[in-house]
Image (spheres, rainbow, N blue to C red):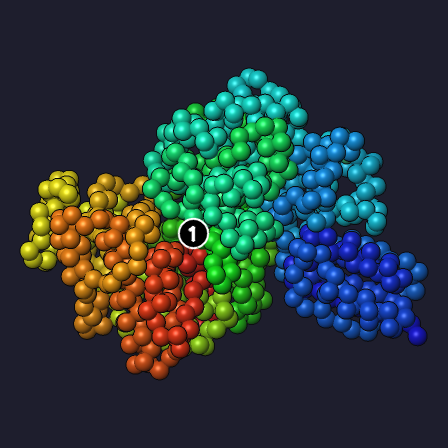
Amino acid sequence: MTEARRLHVTGVVQGVGFRPFVARLAEAHRLAGWVRNGPDGVEIHVEGPAATVGAFTAALETEAPPAARIEAIASATALPEGDGAFHIRESRRQTAPTARISPDLPVCDACLREMRDPQARRFGYPYINCTSCGPRFSIVRALPYDRSRTTMAAWPMCRQCAEEYADPGDRRFHAEPVACPQCGPSYRLERGADVEASGAAIRGAAGLLRAGALVAIKGIGGYHLCCDGRNAEAVEALRERKYRKSRPFAVMVKDLEAARMLVDVTEAAASLLTSAARPIVLLPARERLHGVAPDLHELGVMLPYAPVHHLLFEAGAPDVLVMTSANRSSEPIAFDDADARERLAGIADAFLAGEREIARRIDDSVARAGPDGPTLLRRGRGYAPAIVARLPSLQPILAVGADLKNTVTLVVRGQALVSQHIGDLEHLSAREAFHGTITDLLSMYAIEPGQLSVAHDLHPHYASTLHALDLAAAGTLAVQHHRAHVASVLAEREALDVRVIGVAFDGTGYGDDGTIWGGEFFAGSVAGGLERVGSLRPFGLPGGDAAARYPIQAAAGLLKDVERLPDLAAPPFSFPGRYDQARRLAEAGLRTFDTTSAGRLFDAAAAILGFTGAIDFEGQAAVWLESLARRAAPCRPLPFQIADSQIDLRPAIRMMAERRLAGEAEAVLARAFHETVAEAIARMAQGLCDAHGVDTIALSGGTFQNMLLVDRVRAGLSPALRVWTNARVPTNDGGISLGQAAWAAVRA
Ligand code: ZN
Ligand code: ZN
Ligand code: FE
């Protein structure tokens, strides 16, 4: 008996070889019909014997291509169309697309084998790809995903490529970015007026890197600045030209074996390193690479993902390449060719420039391999723009995030799409990227600002807040920063009704009372609201904006009313004169602002233990302190007090100063400080759980990037309590937009 069915598949099903897979599957089952990309997924029409149609439908799910994520298959009977064969049809574009585009995929093994085969057409070709690999989100200009709407539209296929593209038996059947050396883009090496093309370009770049040069290399989501990671002078030069004194650089190594020489690679880390996202993975360093990640216990490592990276290593590039986003300081990554030339003039000695345009910038993602699965610290290439959660809102919501580590979240038909990492909005170029990303997302999903409900931070002067208020949206909602942090954890778990004790520890966030918060405890839920039920004891922070740059200023504020303190200007502390000035400001209450910031608390502790200079990236003193603490064994906490629902750590800080003066090792004291903060958080949270009758604790905020702290907090809590942390969005401010979106979704 012949049956005809119309199937509608939703999820990540475009740009992952899904239509060719469907066509092959239908042919294997000898079914007739067609498949096409629709605005919100893939539509399939099949007809044939009823039993075969059933088997085909089941196999859709079980045999789907590796990069596909099927969310649902809706099925309905249809009228037979009587066509004897199976076809791939043109895409259908409607008014409001919601189909998901795949993240960018690393070059697959089949393509690598072909690229290394001297007999193959694509031998040594840096733009090789197929339906299971290659760029996606970074080349898409509009949905649905078709070559004509990607940056490959500029390269008409040659006859051979067109045949592969049209052949259902070929692995490039409907591979949208398909290309070859005859018809596709290539790479050039530009060094002053000198230009070399294709193979010579890559060999030339590898030679320059061996010789210690800095080379700008165009990848998938932007340009990297590269140099030999074992060449101290080259690394030094990169730091000088990029104005980066001590911010850690990530490295790319040839393969897992090479990674194992540099860092401890657990099984979980190996699978994260080789996963389709190919993120930078932070791992315990085994070998010290001079100047690459100064003073830190971890090193960020990634494996090659674009064909050009493999070709570089095969052409003899050094085994360890520093690969850092090509930009100055913390501006967004350069991705446009002309812009890269201009911004990197005077930084890069040469450009290895590819001709395929990048439609939008996407930084490398940064992740850790935790015991409960990967956690993301920066969401970018390989993850964006996947849906991270479903939220209960039918109205489109745009959440604009915070001003540091900005991301934005768009909720379309209840699906929350978190943008790639955008950066710190203090930079003009980052603000432009922020505006561009919003425009990009809205146009991709055909949403007008007037339809939107917009969520933003409570901070009245954030650039993100001002832009949100400028959007002419249907409505706006201010969400307090630390509530958004807690909400981001609950949003990931789609647990907006679950009552929790939320702990939000970070550097800076605007509080309900207009002071700077950052060490907060809440009780409640996203749906019912989060009441502030505790915090760190507030202290004065002297010196305004500079206070976040100089840990000794935080120390001056925190220690203002501590008696019997050793002389911090004398050894071993040797605080510079800035400390006394800050202390006088704090005592007079001049240019001094109240804060409960955990970040500034860690700054003060770091200052006491020897970090007396300026920081040059956010959180630097805290990661320095964690790395120091990891050199010492577990120990007992120092004294602290909890009174009036406030944690007072001044006794611990004073004892650290006394014990350091008495000659105790800084590492031991750093460890003791971690044990103390963890114990204080655990005791407070446990007490609040009992008082409010809840059994779940949600930890979020940049301070919880410190895994030593998180581990010790967990260890201090009763095993009967659940501890939830961020995994899919960063615990730092990169997760704020998701939390805001969740907050708005239950209030829109
Ligand atoms: Zn491939
Ligand atoms: Zn071709
Ligand atoms: Fe924050």
Please, is residue 132 above or below residue 563 in the view? above
Judging depth in this view, the residue of 318 and 22 nearest the camera is 318
Residue 709 visible in this rendered orientation of the protein: yes
Q: Is the distance from the Cβ of mark 1 to the nearest ligand 3 atom less than 8 Å? A: no
- Across and down, in percent, residue 627 comes to 33, 49
Q: Residue furthest top?
A: 193
Relative placement, left or right, of 466 versus 213 is left
Q: Position of residue 676 (x, y in %)?
A: 25, 62
Label 1 amino acid? Asn
* Quadrant assignment for the N terminus: bottom right
Horizontal side of residue 31 vs 339, given as left or right: right
Q: Residues within 10 Å of mark 1 (few under 14, many from 20)?
A: many
Q: Secondary structure at mark 1?
A: loop
Q: Is residue 602 above or below residue 351?
A: below
Taking the spot 43% from the left edge, 52% from the top edge, the residue there is 406
Q: Which residue is mark 1?
A: 406
Which residue is at 63% across, 48% downward? 105
Give the residue displayed 68% in from the left and 68% down from the top.
Answer: 72
**Residue 665 in the image, given as x and y percentages of width and height:** 22, 48
Is 480 left or right of 609, judged from the image as shown? right
